[in-house]
Amino acid sequence: MGVVNPISKNGVTCDFAPRCWWCQEPIDASDQPRAALQNLHSECGIRRIVGSLAHLERRCSCHVPGSAEADPPGMSKRKAALKAVELWRKQQMQVEQRLDRTAEQDTE
Ligand SMILES: [Zn+2]
Ligand SMILES: [Zn+2]
C-alpha cells in the first residue's frame, strides 16, 4: 500500500480529513462521530471483528481447506466491509428469528 496522496482535486492539501485506517478512505460527516475519533468507519470496525464476506458465507479457510479468507477481489476494502456487515446483520436477524421460534415452542 503506497502513501495516500494528501492533495485533493482542487489542489488544496486536506491533511485534516480523517481517514479510516482499515480501508484508507476518508471519513465524512455522514459517518458516525465516533468514526472520526477512532479513524475507523463503524462498518469497517464491525468487519474487522466479524470477518470477511468469504468467512461469513463459510467459503473461507475456516470452513473450506485451502481457500482464502480475503475480501472479494476487485472490491474496495470499504465496499467489502459494507457488504460483509450487510450480510452479518441479515445473519444476526435470522438467528434471532430462530431463537424466537424456539422460545415459542418452549411455552407450548
Ligand atoms: Zn473504513
Ligand atoms: Zn474464516
Image: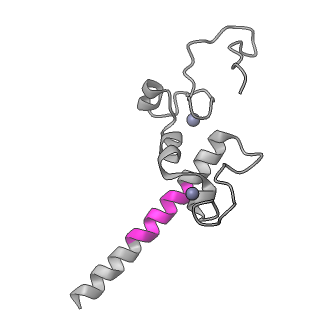
Q: Is residue 88 magenta?
A: yes
| Residue that appears at 29% across and 87% down | 105
Q: Quadrant for the C terminus, please.
A: bottom left
| Residue that appears at 64% across and 53% down | 69
Foreground residue among 91 and 52: 52
Question: Which quadrant of the figure has residue 32?
Answer: top left
| Residue that appears at 35% across and 81% down | 101
In the image, which residues are magenta?
86-96
Q: Is residue 105 above or below residue 8?
A: below
Q: What coloring was used for the rendering?
A: one colour
Count of labels in the image: 0
For the stretch drawn in magenta, the main secondary structure is helix
| Rendering coords of residue 91 (x, y %) | 49, 65
| Rendering coords of residue 76 (x, y %) | 70, 41
The quarter of the picture showing ligand 1: top right
| Rendering coords of residue 6 (x, y %) | 68, 14
Q: Is residue 4 left or right of residue 56?
A: right
Extreme-front residue of the structure:
66
Q: Is residue 58 magenta?
A: no
Q: Is residue 92 above or below residue 21?
A: below
Q: Is residue 99 left or right of residue 75?
A: left
Q: Is residue 26 left or right of residue 94?
A: right
Foreground residue among 65 and 98: 65
Q: Is residue 91 above or below residue 98?
A: above
| Residue that appears at 40% across and 73% down | 97
Q: Quadrant for the N terminus, please.
A: top right
Q: Is residue 6 above or below residue 29?
A: above
Foreground residue among 106 and 64: 64
| Rendering coords of residue 96 (x, y %) | 38, 69
